[in-house]
């Protein structure tokens, strides 16, 4: 669900709400990048639990496009990067931000990996990259429930089934447990042996 100011307001203190309103006013100002400092400071003013939503509202209000999102992602902390990734489906209709998803999937930060496998990845990652994203989730213990469009994309995917089988065999041969989510994804392919 897309965050709204009214939906976020009850979760904020009076000071947090005043800060958010001032930040949104700055973000709406034409050709003024001052709001980007507010983007970075959101967690300190609205709390970590509301920071992703506040950052989304700032990005939306500023009309942030791929260039701004890329800059904020590259310069940001893990929390700021996660907020950018979560905002992609609403702000970038095309594949221009795929490099951000690919970067997040190379990270070992499970919060970034979980954000990277959302609806934007489901729509824009090519099959090869998407399969590796699923395996990354299994390897890093990110629940496969976080993978948007999993059932649709996994259905009938023989290459994904092969990769999952190889991963399971490697884990078993090494005496390591096979992640429970692997069997679920393999069943979704419809090609379980």
Image (spheres, rainbow, N blue to C red):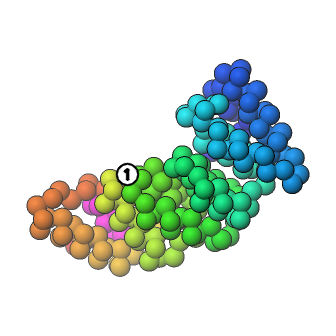
Q: Quadrant of residue 93?
A: bottom right
Magenta highlight: main SS: helix
Tell me the quadrant of the picture where the N terminus can be found. top right
Q: Is residue 61 magenta?
A: no
Q: Quadrant of residue 4?
A: top right
* Left/right of residue 155 with respect to residue 91 in the rendered view: left
- Residue at x-position 80% and y-position 34%: 22
Mark 1: few/some/many CA within 10 Å (<14, 14-19, 20+): some
The answer to whether residue 90 shows anywhere in this view is yes
Tell me the quadrant of the picture where the C terminus can be found. bottom left
* Left/right of residue 32 with respect to residue 118 in the rendered view: right
Q: What x and y, as percent, mark residue 109?
A: 42, 53
Q: Quadrant of residue 65?
A: bottom right
- Residue at x-position 75% and y-position 56%: 64
- Residue at x-position 45% and y-position 63%: 105
Total number of numbered discs in the rendering: 1
The answer to whether residue 147 shows anywhere in this view is no
Q: Is disc 1 placed on a helix, strand or loop?
A: loop
The image shows residue 190, relative to residue 114, as above or below, that is: below
Q: Residue furthest right?
A: 30
Q: What x and y, as percent, mark residue 189?
A: 36, 69
* Left/right of residue 59 with respect to residue 30 in the rendered view: left
Q: Which one is nearer the viewer's eye here, 146 or 110?
A: 110
Q: What x and y, as percent, mark residue 78?
A: 51, 49
Q: Which one is nearer the viewer's eye here, 57 or 33?
A: 33
User: Which residue corresponds to mark 1?
Assistant: 143
Q: Is residue 189 magenta?
A: yes
Which region of the structure is painted magenta?
A: 182-190
- Residue at x-position 68% and y-position 56%: 90
Q: What x and y, as percent, mark residue 118?
A: 53, 57
């Amino acid at each position: 669900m897309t965050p709204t100011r009214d939906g976020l307001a009850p979760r904020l203190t009076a000071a947090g709400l005043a800060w958010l309103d001032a930040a949104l006013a700055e973000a709406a100002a034409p050709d003024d990048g001052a709001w980007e400092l507010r983007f970075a400071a959101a967690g300190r003013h609205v709390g970590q639990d509301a920071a992703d939503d506040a950052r989304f509202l700032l990005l939306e209000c500023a009309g942030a496009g791929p260039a701004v999102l890329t800059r904020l992602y590259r310069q940001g902390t893990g929390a700021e990067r996660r907020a950018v990734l979560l905002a992609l489906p609403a702000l970038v209709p095309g594949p221009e931000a795929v490099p951000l998803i690919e970067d997040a999937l190379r990270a070992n930060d499970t919060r970034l990996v979980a954000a990277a496998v959302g609806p934007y990845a489901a729509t824009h990652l090519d099959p090869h990259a998407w399969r590796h994203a699923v395996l990354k989730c299994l390897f890093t213990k990110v629940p496969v429930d976080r993978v948007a469009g999993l059932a649709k994309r996994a259905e009938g995917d023989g290459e994904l089934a092969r990769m999952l089988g190889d991963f399971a065999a490697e884990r078993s041969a090494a005496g390591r447990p096979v992640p429970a989510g692997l069997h679920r994804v393999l069943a979704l392919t419809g090609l379980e042996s």
